[in-house]
Amino acid sequence: MAFGPHLLLALLEGLVSSAVLALTALGLSLVFGVMRIVNVAHGEFFMLGAVFAWWFSSMIAGSPALGFLLALVLAPLVVGAIALVAERLVLRRLEYDPEATIVATIGMLYIFEQLALMFYGPEARAVPAPFDFRVTLPWFGYSGYKLAVIAASVLVMLATWYVLTRTRIGLVMRATQYDRETAQAFGIPVGRVYAGVFALGAMLAALAAVLIVPIQQAHYLMGTDPLLLSFIVVIIGGLGSLRGTVLAAVLIGLTEGIVAVFFSPTLAKMLATLFVALVLVFRPQGLFGQAPR
Amino acid sequence: MPELLKMEKIGASYGSVQVLRDVSLELGSGEVLCLLGRNGAGKTTLLKTIMGLVRAISGSILLDGMELTRLPPHEVPRHGVAYVPQGRRLFAELTVAENIEIGLMTRQKGSETREAVLDLFPVLRERLGQRSGTLSGGEQQMLAMARALATEPKVLLLDEPTEGLMPSAIAKIRETVAALRAHGVSTLLVEQRVDAVLPVADRVLFIENGRSVRTIGVAELRADPAMVRHYVGVG
Ligand SMILES: Nc1ncnc2c1ncn2[C@@H]1O[C@H](COP(=O)(O)OP(=O)(O)OP(=O)(O)O)[C@@H](O)[C@H]1O
Ligand SMILES: [Mg+2]
């Protein structure tokens, strides 16, 4: 393949990674932004989303489209419910203490991982794509499903932005983020907002996972990479900055795609890590975050 | 005057340090009661305890006969108690309009209330889209008042609203409190400076080391200024 088409292919692959990464990182960023909790178990919600996607889609054999649709709706809901229970049983009892919740979510990580191993098993399983339409470009054919993943991610990001900035629920979330005590003094049930945000963060990760399982298989250890990359994105983009999260996800996703295609995936990871180190040294609040006032 | 808010023998603590001991007070309908006391006497803690932000460990707080200490904190404002915190505590990243909106949402008030509040503080109307953290100190205080009044409260808790303001801004706050009293709103006003409160207050309650030590009428206080020096340490 000539260089131009090869680059285009790398860009497309990078955009698919960016799309999935942006959703996952957005969930992590929301939870940290509003609740000030570093959720180490975030990658496990991604993994659970993938596992449940396989489970739901395999319930409807014979019709990949219907099975996928079922997974797309139900997997995030189930994962959201699991997150809600975890929040009520664990995080709330720790009173959202920043240090204690790190340890607690590390524990949750292992519990979810082992439960997945027990009930889902060590196999990697694929979910069939809902459609296998191919877009024919002059140089190569490209998966229509992958393009749909990019579009879906953009839609969800736009919806999240709309909810956060244009609706009352978003206003309540932002008020809680900026001053929890004063929010309570204005009738905002902070505990319920936290529960909702934690569930929403988990659902975003689960949704990202449902989108990826037709491309990458579901496996009980698949949560580690998205967790690491989400942290990288959130640090580079600046915590609590939606715009920063999206731009950093695109940056990291594209770098991954291009460097991995032309050089090696390991070099891509090294570059991402180097970039985080540089950001931490020269702009600790992230590229788009605001310095604490 | 029938009391609207009645606090009886309230105790409150931060962790193991008890800050309030047996604090009692009564606030009548349309009354302005001023709390005076030295730094660290527990005035802010007292207001936070009414809001449920600090848990009472003993005693009771009745609003119109309803026990407030058993409510979760976010329910207290919904029953008509509004809070203007010390240092304003605006949602600094939110705009002026959004801060007022949060006040309105507390008790599901609509555009009528919003207009009334903006008429009270016309400076805010010109700055609705501005991020509230960038307002001047005086404007921020007006916004903190506007946000609280957007809940159409029965009881207003004001914690040092004149702190760091110029005389003209102080006069504006004082006018507002007087206007609210005329509308039957009861106010619990924390102040450091006696001269700022004498014109608006009906009675004064002295707080000393977390205890309510004495309540007297304003006329009596005017007649005996030495009392202020005794309890507050400044004239
Ligand atoms: N969050 C907290 N944790 C622990 N102790 C606190 C806390 N807030 C206040 N205190 C303590 O409680 C006591 C009363 O504080 P409070 O803020 O109620 O005083 P205040 O009368 O409002 O003083 P000022 O006039 O300076 O505002 C002080 O000794 C203070 O150090
Ligand atoms: Mg105080």
Image: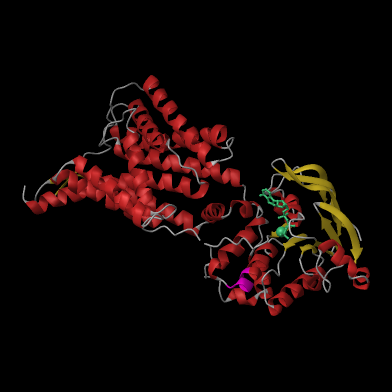
Q: What number of labels is visible?
A: 0
Name the image quarter holding residue A112: top left
Quarter where residue A168 is shown: bottom right
Region rendered in magenta: B136-140
Q: Residue A200: where, in percent of width, then height?
A: 47, 43
| Residue B180: % across, % down | 78, 69
Q: Is residue A13 visible?
A: no
Residue A71 appears anywhere in the view: yes
Residues B122 and A78: in front is B122
Magenta stretch containing residue B165, yes or no? no
Horizontal side of residue B69 vs A217, given as left or right: right
Q: Main secondary structure of the magenta part?
A: helix
Task: Tell me what residue is drawn at x 14 percent, y 51 percent.
Answer: A7
| Left/right of residue B220 with respect to residue B56 in the rendered view | right
Indicate the quadrant of ligand 2 in the picture. bottom right
* As drawn, B4 above or below A66: below
Q: Give the residue displayed 64% in from the left and 73% down from the top.
A: B138
Q: Kindly give the residue lying farthest to the left in the view shown.
A: A2
Q: Nearer the viewer, residue B121 or A160?
A: B121
Q: Inspect the magenta stretch and tell me whether residue B139 lies in it.
A: yes
